[in-house]
Image (cartoon, helix red, strand yellow):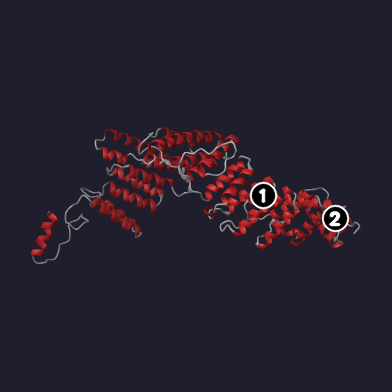
Amino acid sequence: MLGLFRQTVVLSTKRIPRRAPRKPTYDGTGKLQSTDSYLLAARVKELSQKKKFNEAYAVVQNESRGNGLANVVVWNQLLQESRINQKPSDTYKLFMEMKKRGITPNSRSYTIVFRALSGVDKERPTKKVIEAAETIFRQFGIYQQSLDDEIDRNLVEEERSVLPINAYLSILSKVAHSKDMMDVFEDMADIGPSSADTYTYTTLFQGLLKAGQREDVERGLTLWKVYMDRLKDAWKHSKDTPECQRLLPDTALISTVLRLLSKGTPKDCKTGLMIAHIFLGVPSHSPFIEKKELNIPKVELNDRIIDSLYHLGLAAERPSLVIRHADFLLAMDSVKKYISTRSMFFALLACAQEGNSDKAIEYLHMMCTELRRAQPDSQSFDQAMSAAMKARSYKHAKEIYEMAISTKTEVDIRIMSSFIKAALSTGNTGHIFDAMEIFSKYGITRFIKSEDKEQSRTTNKHQRFWEHRLATGLRDALDKLKTQNVPGRTRKHNLLFGEYARVIAGIIGEKKVVNSRNTYDEWDIDL
């Protein structure tokens, strides 16, 4: 009625210039409104998005005096903008200033400050940050207890939230405080909006995975049992309710659980394989285990969970199962787009452990032609070459080498050492001589490098390992050829092989080093 009356007056009188509205107000009525604080919060957001955070802070400070409009809604918006644009310590200081001004933080306030203290994804919180978070979390616990005496039940339901707890658990997860995390979990409500949801369980499993000790795997198994009991009960009695929906597993949860169990015993790995069988629909690790139908929606596949699945199979010492899983997933066109080079590396590693060079070559062909995100690299060809070595198939080893050349992949020391080993595994001097001829196209100096001080210590250590592996392979190949007459061999080969022997002896630390002047005599056999 007031609005209608005001409109009638304006229409029946001459138009006069409107006076500037009385401050503070943000809706043009000239009077304080119940929604003014939300409009002020919108103003704070607008200024922050324009890179004017200091101006937004000044506005909130001005409205925090006397009967200003800067209530908890406005301060929460300022905290949120600070979390996005400022340092975590700045957000913490704002939170403390908010309390000093007599404004009681609510659940959203605690959520924002915990997320700020957590930092970016890979940033590890400092000890000082952890101590500050622990202090604030104790204050949050007191605030939650005070809600028990609150008369307004709608307010209580709104403030009972799992979000602040999840944000705090995220901090503990990053520093692998697994015991503290589980203590927090034990104190959480069993049901309701402040009970654990899927994100809670995922965060807990991530913290246990980062800790990575045997006791953490055991905690993970116990936690998984609690989660499954809750999920089954909710799905059985109230599958369409929010309580059930907030517990449904997702890719991040299952992937993290599989990774954690891969750190455990073979029995733990089997538990993980059963979880994958149920939630991913992949073949079971045993033909005697039937699929347990819970009618729970399957988890969406992506590259992360595929990596975790293959990694678990390798940890369980079941390379044949990894190959079965790879074949199962590669047969699904909808999944191929998620398969990455890293995923196929695990599959090729399984082929290497099984000595299945046929399957390794099949995977390489698929990587070259069908899998857009899984182009083969040096590690891919190295694992395929290792499969040929274990299968004692020089034919397959040479085919893999030619594929590497055709795809313009650099033939590095890993591929070449495995190639020499594959030729040696056959025991055929013709194959060994052919492999040595291919090796001679590159020369030993291509693969043997002096220590690079600019490289990391680990990189140099890996280089030394592969140099020693190549050197031992070449030494064994030369020993095989030394007393054998191979068609096509010339004195030029003998000179070259003698030079290899001299370099090899220096690498593997043999006392006898071939004299370069006597190299030809050392290798001068009947040709």
Q: Which mark is residue 515?
A: 2
Q: Quadrant of residue 373?
A: bottom right
Q: Residue at x 61, y 41 (%)?
A: 315
Q: Position of residue 348 (x, y in %)?
A: 64, 50
Q: Earlier in the sequence, mark 2 or mark 1?
A: 1
Q: CA distance from mark 2 to mark 1?
A: 28 Å
Q: Amino acid at mark 2?
A: Asn
Q: Are marks 2 and 1 in contact (CB under 8 Å)?
A: no
Q: How many marks?
A: 2
Q: Amino acid at mark 1?
A: Lys
Local crowd size for mark 2, using a 10 Å CA cut-off: few (<14), some (14–19), many (≥20): some
Q: Position of residue 510 (x, y in %)?
A: 80, 48
Q: Which residue is mark 1?
A: 461
Whether residue 386 is visible, yes or no, is: no
Q: Residue at x 62, y 59 (%)?
A: 368
* The one of 52 and 492 positioned closer to us in this rendering: 492
Q: Position of residue 182 (x, y in %)?
A: 45, 34
Q: Which mark is residue 51?
A: none
Secondary-structure class at tag 1: helix
Q: Position of residue 196 (x, y in %)?
A: 41, 38
Whether residue 38 is visible, yes or no, is: yes
Q: Quadrant of residue 133?
A: top left
Position of the C terminus by quadrant: bottom right
Secondary-structure class at tag 2: loop
Local crowd size for mark 1, using a 10 Å CA cut-off: few (<14), some (14–19), many (≥20): few
Q: Is residue 295 above or below residue 46?
A: above
* The one of 273 and 153 positioned closer to us in this rendering: 273
